[in-house]
Image: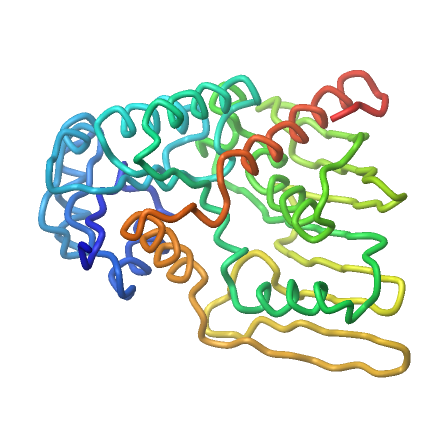
Amino acid sequence: MQKKLRWGILSSAKIARTKLIPALVNSAHNEVVAIASRSLASAQACAQELAIPTAYGSYQELLADPNVDVIYNPLPNDLHVPWSIAALQAGKHVLCEKPIGLDTADTEKLIAASRAHPQLKIMEAFMYRFHPQWQAVKRWLAEGLIGDVKAVQAYFTYNNHETDNIRNNPAAGGGALMDIGCYGISVARWVIGAEPLQVVAQLDLHPEYQVDQLALLNLQFPAGVMASVLCGTKMESGQGVYISGSAGSITLERPFYCVGDEPNAVVVRKDTQVSRHEFAGMDHYQFMVDAFAQSCLADLDVPTGLDDALANMQVIDAAFASARAGLWQAV
C-alpha cells in the first residue's frame, strides 16, 4: 500500500494556507506536492512560503499532474461542484470545502460524477466532526449519559468587515447560512441521528450585498425532537452547541473551531453533578486529513459520504424556501 497520499491544493485560499496545508505537513499519511492559482505569481509565492515543490498558474494544470493523488478544493461555493467533478474526471480523490454545492441540484451533479468514478473518494470537509471532543460527546450520547436527546441549539457568528469578500456575493453562494449555518445544521442532524421533517427560517438580508447576514432556523425532527440554528456574519464572533437530554445536558463551548492553543471545553450536567472536560492541543484538520487519507490508501468508505452532504444541502434549500414563503417547509 502506498505510504503517503500526495495532495494538490486548488487555489491559495486562506483556509488552505493557514489550516489545511499545515495539517497535511504535520500528518502521518499526507504530503503536499503542488498548488495552483489563477495567477502563477500567487501560486509561486505561496509555494515558496509553505515549501511546496510545484506551483501552477491554472487549476487545469494541477489536475493534469500525474504526481497528484488528491485535490483539496477550497474555492468559492459556486466552484465546488464544477472543479470537484473536473478533479474526479482527472482521476483524483477530492476533499471539498463546505457547503459541497450551491443547492441540492448542484450536489446531485457531483454525486452522479462520483458514481461514474467509484474507485475515487470524495468527502465534504466538515473538520469539526474529527475533533476528539466530538468523539467523546458521540460516545457519551451512545452510552445514554444524558438520556434521550430532546433538543439541540447551535450558534456560529463572526463579523465580516471585508467589502470585497466572496461571502458577500449571492451568485457565488454567499451569506451566513451557506458559510456557517451549514455547521449548525450538520451538527443537529449528526447529534440527533435523524433528518429533520420540516424547517422554518428567518433571514435578514444585507441591504447592499443582498445576502443573508443573519439567519435563524427552527428544525422539527421525528419523535418531537427540535433544533435551532443561529448564524450571522455582521456580529460579535462566537460559537456554541447545547444538547439537552431527558437526563442531563452537554454544552460545547467551541464546537466548530479551535482558538489558538486554548483548550476546547465540554461541560456535562447530570442531576446536580457538573463536570468539565478540556481538550487541548488538538488539530481537527489534521485528524480529518489523516482519516480521509486512510480511506483513500486502504480503499475504505470515507467517514462522511456525499449522502450526508446532500442531506445537509436539502435542509439549506428548505430553509431558503421557508424564508421566502414565511412558512414551515418540508425537507
Position of residue 77 in the picture relative to residue 251 (left or right): left
Position of residue 162 in the picture relative to residue 55 (left or right): right
Residue 95 lies in quadrant = top left
| 123 to 291, vertically: above or below | above
Residue situated in front as seen by the camera: 182 or 305: 305
Indicate the position of residue 318 as horizontal and vertical percent values.
71, 24
| 50 to 270, vertically: above or below | above
Indicate the position of residue 151 as horizontal and vertical percent values.
83, 52
Indicate the position of residue 113 as horizontal and vertical percent values.
38, 22
Which colouring convention does the figure follow? Answer: rainbow
Which residue does the image show at 22% across and 31% down from the upper left?
91
Indicate the position of residue 24 as horizontal and vertical percent values.
28, 57
Q: Identify the image quadrant of the N terminus.
A: bottom left
| 4 to 204, vertically: above or below | below
Which residue does the image show at 28% across and 54% down from the upper left?
21
Q: How many marks?
A: 0
